[in-house]
Amino acid sequence: MTAEIFNIQRFCLHDGDGIRTAVFFKGCPLSCLWCHNPEGQSPARQLMYHSSKCTGCGACLCAARVLENGKIRLDREKCTLCAKCVPACIAGANEICGRSAEVSEIFEEVLKDLPFYGEKGGMTLSGGEPLMQPEAAAQLLSLAKNAGIGTVIETSGAVDRSAFEMTLEYNPQYYYDIKAIDPQKHKKLCGKDNTQILENLEFLFSRGADTVLRLPLIPGLNDSEKELEALSVFLRENEPYYKRAEIMKYHSFGLSKAAALSKEYTAPKDSAKACDAVKWQNFLKANGAEKVIIS
Amino acid sequence: MLVKDVQINNRKETDKIMEYKYIQEYFAEAFLRAEKLSMPERIAAGTLAAAEHLSIDFPENCMLPTVSLRAPMSACGYGFGSGIFYSQGMHDWLVSTYPERREEMEDLRRRILPYCTHTAWMESATEEELLMRDTYACWGGDWGGHGNPDYGRLLKLGTDGLRTLVNKYKEVNTESEGFYNACLTVLDAADTVGRRIREMSLSFAEAETDGERKREWLRIAETFTRLPREGAWDMYSAMMLFWMFFTMDGNDSPGRMDQFMIDFYRKSSPAQNSEMIDRFLEGMHNVRGWNLCISGSNEKGEDETNELSYAILEAVRNKGYQTPNLTMRVNPKTPEKLWQAAADCLATGVGLPAIYNDETVCPALEKIGISHTHAHEYCMNGCNQIDIMGKSHMGLEDGEVNFAKALELCLHDGCDYEGGERRRIMPSLGKAADCKNFSEFSELYFKYLDYVTDTSVSMSNKSQKIYAEYAPHPMRSCLIEGCLERGVDYNSGGPLYNHGQILAEGMADAADSLYAVKKLVFDTKKYSMEELQKALAANFENYETLWHDFSSQDKFGNDIPECDSICTYICDHYLKYLKTKKTYRGGSFTGGCSPYNRAAENGAHTGALPNGKRRGDPTLADSIAATPGRDKCGPTASLKSMMRYDQSEACSGFVAQLRFDKNLFNTEKGKAAFITLAKAYFAGGGQQLSVNVLDRETLLDAQRNPAAHGDLIVRVGGYSDYFANLTPELQQNIIDRTEFSV
């Protein structure tokens, strides 16, 4: 069995406890404005062109590429993803994002850091949306469980119920995003409303799954008092069912990657603009959501 | 004028000097006068004569009696690292200041120089050896080596107790009378210094107007009515006695202080304890003392961490000084609390402590014949060399071999291209172009590497013989087990263990080069050996495609077994080969890895290499790790590669470094990750870990505005230093080295 992935990253410290290896699955049902991994959205392979690395030497020119003001203008319609431009560029400006990998090959990579996982660390399935490829995800979880490696799934929840049914038996920890409570707002920000997401979450709760909620805080997009109030009600009402809720401070690392994909990026471009996580946390706590921490 | 020039800190001392009508070479004259006696007795006679005149300083910040190795206004003295030395700078100043003494001084210099170890060593070295040293293929000897005297013995016995011990063995080993007499004489010299400390303190007290300082002078004077003849009785007297001897010994390394001081610590008040630790660290900062060791396990595997281990660690953290190097020994039973305290200390960016794994170090020591119990008494000295406290002369260190340069010599038939021109450095041992396969080529490399190693061994052994003959060290002999017992000097094989350590430089560069040659010359046959040789001779100029092909091959440090195995293969060969060589002192040679500060010099003198290194590029491997910037898969992959070495073959420091971004390390997650990494590395056979906590922006800024970052400390291999003190090349290397972040 194969999985479409775009990266395997060792020594991850922020996607679960301890030292972890994260497998990034390609393809996501959502298209959040602030997405920090925009290369994970499309399930298809994509060419990334990093113009800042480009020296304008022209070694990569082809039918899809024109040299303009010392940089490449790319006609993505004409690009056949032949990948010849990748080795042609000594500066490393061209990259093909996404590949098919055997589950066993992925797991071999995960096993490399086995000495460092200890009791807390392990494997994190991330993306994109790992549960869009539930069979591959389940296989990896099964392999990890047999090897005694702890697992985390980072999910948007916007997937078919069966994906959760298939993965629950391996007891992974679910890192589950709550991006907005209001369905219309969610649709505006993420391209899809949150009915399915909240239903799936309720299902996980009902099954007693080990769940950590994640609350991405995007200044100006989802941090109004009204939204925070709705969020606090939700968190308070479901408090017995999740382990903790982590406020994720916004950063704009996705910006340059979006540019490399010729994608628009409409979230705030300046991540230095303070996102006041402490204020958020205080507000949510004051409204009875006790398990909120800042990630 | 005079006062300023010779930098005498104590006015009373200066006044005394002014009374001397003429300059005096107390050590040299007494040494030369005693020509009928044995060499240890002559050194001791010089030491005793100088003891009456050595400058004794009480720096403001520590008020510890700090003894210098040479009397002020003398050019000649004696030290553990140099034997008898003669300062040409001081000589020049003296003859220009006192022209009427020129003839006498020159006569003295003429008579003493033949006894200077450096002179003798230069005479003994061959032209080829000197050429190999000057071209950075290797060096050996011409340095006495660090040692860790048993200060526990000193604090327990005092000089009177030591005298009793000397006399006891003197009766047994009657043939070593001269040696024992020398030991007794240096103990008298110590008593002389002790008496002068008391007299000086009393006179300072008299002149002192500040009440608190006056009390302190009187306290020192009072303490030295009993010291150094009696052993110590509390933390205050223990530190005073230790310090006097430590500085008389030349400010080397205290060793396992938390073990030999703990009884005094427990007997004293918390106020006295913290005061003395504070003064000790201030003093160490003044004299740039070397290596201080805490914690460790004993022969039963029991952890020996105590209250003093924590107190020292906390004081080092609060002080933030980069000297001494602090070493922390760990084992599976090391308390979690100590790990946490170490992480908190590292988080400040001080680069300390360096952490050593007993589970790898002790077996490595046992393999060369050190007893199980004694192996557990190891401590560190110098940058990162392993010593057995109070029991050994391990030659820290005896020499160094540049693996990268050896490969350059192998590729060019014994010649190098350091200056751009072909130059013969050593005889041809076979031609790279004649090798039919990779196995033949790697065998040829070993021939060259062994030859370079032999040269280092030869230079070192000549030096060891010279130190045995010209530089006996009765003071250390009193404090290193075996010497008094056998009646044999510290430099002549007296200690229980007399091994030697020759360090390796540029291992990953040589390994990556061999791997690239394997792939492109022998496996795919994309290039011929001749083409490669031409490209290297031309420093890759007009060979850009070839350079790109060679430099983009896989590198050590990325957890790629095929690639890593070449590095571990050559390292293993080297370590095992060294063990077949005997030291003049009477042990076997062993190997380890150089601290990072040497890489830049060695790299600058190594020509173009098949890993893509260009001539003049000072970058060489970061001790046992990858060549800076070549490990691209993060710290776990980097450590996995290093875990592939058989580190239990290495008896000198096998330095692995991690550099953390400050923002990362300074979180609970960051510190926990570090502890997890360290424990996993050690469980996998790792020997040592050191950590730099810094941010790249800070370093870049420090490079641009050194004045604004005068206090930025980085760990440079075995030691930490101010970033601003480093050469531009070394600064760049530190910036280039992978900085792990998330």
Image (cartoon, coloured by chain):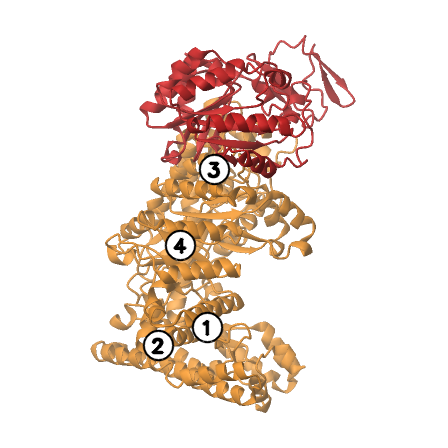
Q: Chain of mark 3?
A: B
Chain letter, orange:
B
User: Mark 4 = which residue?
Assistant: B328
Q: Earlier in the sequence, mark 4 or mark 1?
A: 1
Could you confirm whether marks 3 and 1 are on the same chain?
A: yes
Asked whether the residues under the numbered discs 3 and 4 touch, taking CB atoms below 8 Å apart as contact, a structural biologist would say no
Label 4, secondary structure: give it: strand
- Between the residue at mark 3 and the residue at mark 2, the CA separation in whole angstroms equals 47 Å
- Between the residue at mark 3 and the residue at mark 1, the CA separation in whole angstroms equals 40 Å
Name the front one of labels 1 and 2.
Answer: 2
Asked whether the residues under the numbered discs 2 and 4 touch, taking CB atoms below 8 Å apart as contact, a structural biologist would say no
* Amino acid type at mark 1: Thr
- Between the residue at mark 1 and the residue at mark 2, the CA separation in whole angstroms equals 17 Å
User: Mark 3 = which residue?
Assistant: B635
Residue B232 numbered mark, or none: 2
- Between the residue at mark 4 and the residue at mark 1, the CA separation in whole angstroms equals 23 Å
Q: Chain of mark 2?
A: B
